[in-house]
């Protein structure tokens, strides 16, 4: 299993010392990262990744609100092969018309991405699960409107905060899910209360096992009250120990 770290987790450290932060990530044992806002940092980030032997198979960028050519060019420079739109606001998930419009725009972005050899995906928050469209969650309704080449990165914590069982949702979404965000905590919107994997209310190992076509499991904290480097190290150690126990 490949484990990555969403660099948004380390945004404060990155702003202070990008090369030093990437070095720490490698020292902790991560071999992959998931950059965010990477157009702005592509050159510096690319150097740091190369120096530390890290790759970035996926990255987050606002595909539906910024220059797609610029995003895909920066992604290609960094070796990112899947670009994921990380956020469509809650008010866009309340009607079939709005969701259909978002799906159409993401499908168009995927066609442009393909010209760069890059796949496109979407990452959810809680509201796509809280909204019900035609008897299903808005996320499931949305998934059925996407072209086959568009993938999903399911944030399993926000699925649970949104009132759904992540294992059930991953099962329903099936092969569309190529990446997941792995995080833990008390299942509420207090991001500071998030915890290392295995310390909260998420059945993390069941969740990972439920994603049958998983390529990368991405560790993330939206925020954390402790030392963030210790937090991500604990999460990675928990995941690797579980993998070792299975083997």
Image (cartoon, rainbow, N blue to C red):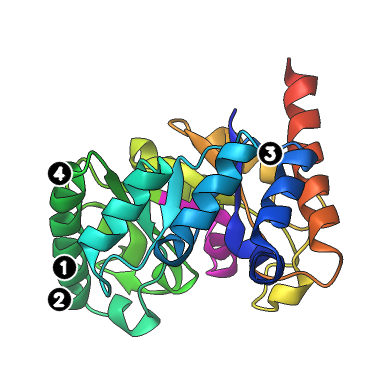
The residue lying at 21 percent from left, 69 percent from top is: 102
Residue underneath mark 2: 97
From the viewer's perspective, tell me whether residue 137 is left or right of residue 229: left
Q: Secondary structure at mark 1?
A: helix
Which of the 4 quarters of the picture holds residue 163? bottom right
Q: Earlier in the sequence, mark 4 or mark 1?
A: 1
Q: What is the span of residues highlighted in magenta in the rendered image?
A: 153-165
Q: Residues within 10 Å of mark 3 (few under 14, many from 20)?
A: many
Q: Nearer the viewer, mark 2 or mark 3?
A: 3
Q: Earlier in the sequence, mark 4 or mark 3?
A: 3
Give the answer, above or below, for where 39 lies relative to 205: below
Residue underneath mark 1: 100
- How far apart are the two marked residues, 2 and 1, measured between alpha carbons? 5 Å
Q: Secondary structure at mark 4?
A: helix
The N terminus appears in which quarter of the rendering? Answer: top right
- How far apart are the two marked residues, 1 and 3, measured between alpha carbons? 37 Å
Marks 2 and 1 close (CB-CB < 8 Å): yes
Residue underneath mark 4: 115
Q: Secondary structure at mark 3?
A: loop
Marks 1 and 3 close (CB-CB < 8 Å): no
The residue lying at 68 percent from left, 45 percent from top is: 204
Give the answer, above or below, for where 159 lies relative to 153: below
Q: Residues within 10 Å of mark 2 (few under 14, many from 20)?
A: few
Marks 2 and 3 close (CB-CB < 8 Å): no
Q: Earlier in the sequence, mark 2 or mark 3?
A: 3
- Observer-nearest of 49 and 2: 49
Q: Position of residue 118 (x, y in %)?
A: 27, 43
Marks 4 and 3 close (CB-CB < 8 Å): no
Q: Nearer the viewer, mark 1 or mark 3?
A: 3
From the viewer's perspective, tell me whether residue 148 is left or right of residue 157: left
- Observer-nearest of 102 and 77: 77
Residue underneath mark 3: 30
């Amino acid at each position: 299993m490949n484990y990555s770290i969403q660099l948004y987790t380390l945004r404060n450290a990155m702003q202070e010392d990008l090369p030093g932060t990437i070095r720490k990530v490698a020292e902790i044992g991560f071999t992959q990262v998931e950059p965010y806002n990477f157009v702005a940092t592509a050159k510096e980030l690319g150097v740091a990744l190369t120096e530390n032997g890290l790759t970035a198979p996926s990255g987050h960028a606002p595909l539906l609100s910024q220059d797609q050519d610029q995003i895909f060019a920066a992604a290609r420079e960094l070796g990112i092969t899947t670009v994921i739109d990380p956020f469509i606001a809650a008010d866009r998930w309340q009607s079939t018309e709005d969701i259909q419009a978002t799906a159409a725009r993401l499908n168009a972005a995927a066609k442009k991405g393909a010209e760069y050899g890059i796949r496109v995906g979407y990452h959810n928050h809680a509201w796509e699960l809280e909204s019900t469209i035609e008897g299903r969650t808005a996320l499931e309704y949305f998934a059925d409107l996407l072209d086959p080449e568009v993938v999903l990165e399911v944030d399993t914590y926000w699925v649970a905060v949104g009132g759904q069982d992540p294992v059930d949702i991953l099962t329903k979404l099936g092969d569309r899910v190529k990446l997941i965000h792995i995080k833990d905590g008390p299942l509420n919107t207090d991001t500071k209360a998030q915890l290392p994997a295995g310390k909260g209310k998420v059945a993390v190992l069941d969740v990972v096992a439920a994603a049958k076509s998983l390529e990368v499991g991405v560790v993330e904290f939206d925020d954390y009250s402790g030392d963030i480097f210790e937090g991500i190290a604990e999460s990675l150690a928990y995941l690797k120990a579980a993998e070792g126990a299975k083997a």
